[in-house]
Amino acid sequence: MFFSFIKKTRPLIKWVLSITLLVCSISVCNAEPNQINWKNLNQAGMQNTLNSNPKQALIYYNKALQLTDNNDVFERITLFNIGKMQLWLEQYPEAEHTYLTLLKMPLDKQDHEIALAGLVKSLAYQDKPRSGYNSIPNNPHYTLPNMVLVAAQAALWSGWSEKAQKILDSNQSVIRQADPKSITYRDLKEVTYATNAETAKNKITPSYDFENDSDGTNIKHYNLEASHYFFPDFRAGLNFTSAAISNDNQRIHGENLFAGVEQRVNNYINYQAKIGYSTFNSWNHALWSANLDIQPNDMVSFSFANQLENVETITALYNKTTYNSTQIKATLNPIYRLRISGSVFYGMFSDDNNRTGYFTSANYLLFDKFGLSTEIRARGYHSSKTDTTGYYNPTSLDEQDFIIKLNHRLLTNWKYYINFCVLGHQETNPGDVTNPRFTEVGINGFITKNLLLNASYGYSNSNYSTAQGYGRHYGMIALQVLF
């Protein structure tokens, strides 16, 4: 009876089994291949990462992200890999978005710290260090060397060196976890040295600078500066300068002695001021300078400055000529890689000649890795008098320059820069239309943790004289001792 029933219902059983197999096959096709493909793409991305091919790895990770099928684990893994490649490729705005997305997900403590470090770095490297620092919660507890690194960088680059010092001092046990062969270790060493240079209790800086031009004028300064931190945000010091100005027929010598202070009032305002006494031959008089900087956020900053200085030519010094200038400057960072600045000034010479002028520039960062950027500059001024003696004074001057800049790491804690004006246009009245050029090269770095070297040299044919074919060489070298 039973076998008879089986025989009669066999077609129905085959039909049910066929439907079941069809449903199972559809389920496998819809789910299992995506999981397999995600794993394959993720593995391909990891292999390219190991082969130092972040661009191709990012392509694989982005494809893998499309196959996570709302699997939270797969999505987190993929986003962490994407963020890492974006930082490697200097795609900082994209990395910022990736890490913000991760921080909205449920993460364990370590993953949250990794994502926060990625966010802080992506902001700081977009010239938004204050936003990066402010994204860190109050009273944080760091467990990863990379988190200590980016927090200290963001504080230092914001101008808050004492905050950077506090981060480094309170996390020495975490810093010691860094692999000495890693990039994190190298960058930690660099930010530690740079922070120490800003916060050292005492600084002594001997320096020498010179300028020689085709008119035969030679200017030399021998400087000695010493300063002391009395409070974490207040520094005071003295600066002595011995100056020698000469030409083919004459020579004049003088000294300046300044006392100055520098203070960061709060996170947004700081000022520098100094007053001094100058003597050239029998001419004794006071000089000063003052500067107020206001930076409410990463996007915009303002500067107000006033200075009374000597006009350093032989004739001007014999005529006891000084120059009192007031300047207002604004700097804007509207988007990543672009920085725009502009200033206007008003100056008064002691011979009753007044000068109004401007300076503006736009700098665009082409390649962050190499520090390669381009800059367009424009400057100009108008003078109220033309019958002056002792210094270059056309009725008006207007100049535009196109400059290529390279600012790159040479070694750990050493950098060099090259500025080259490839195109220039200058008009003076009275005078001629010229094509100014200049080249500047420099190097700076730490000989030891407490000894810094800074040196530069440049050549320019931008008019500072009425002579045709004018050119000048200039340079400086400084050695700073910290203790």
Image (spheres, rainbow, N blue to C red):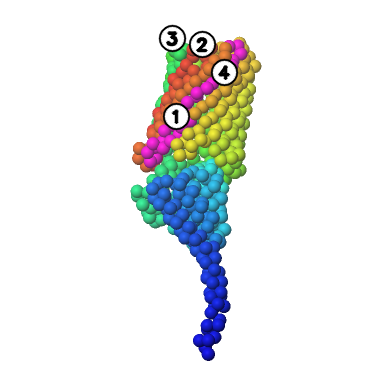
Residue 426 has which mark?
Answer: 4
Q: Nearer the viewer, mark 3 or mark 2?
A: 2
* Label 1: element kind: strand
The kind of residue on which mark 3 rests is Asn
**Could you tell me how far apart the alpha carbons at marks 4 and 1 are, in whole angstroms?**
22 Å
Give the percent coordinates (x, y) of residue 419.
47, 28
* Label 2: element kind: loop
Pick the residue in front: 297 or 91: 91
The kind of residue on which mark 2 rests is Ala
Q: Nearer the viewer, mark 1 or mark 3?
A: 1
Q: Residue at x 54, y 25 (%)?
A: 402
Crowding at label 2, few (<14), some or many (≥20) Cα neighbours within 10 Å?
few
The kind of residue on which mark 4 rests is Gln
Residue 270 has which mark?
Answer: none
Q: Residue at x 51, y 44 (%)?
A: 91
Residue 467 has which mark?
Answer: 2
The kind of residue on which mark 1 rests is Ile
Q: Residue at x 54, y 63 (%)?
A: 30
| Region rendered in magenta | 405-431
The residue that label 1 is drawn on is 418
Q: Earlier in the sequence, mark 4 or mark 2?
A: 4
425 inside magenta stretch: yes
Q: Earlier in the sequence, mark 3 or mark 4?
A: 3
Q: Does 382 sit above or below residue 249? A: below
The residue that label 3 is drawn on is 249
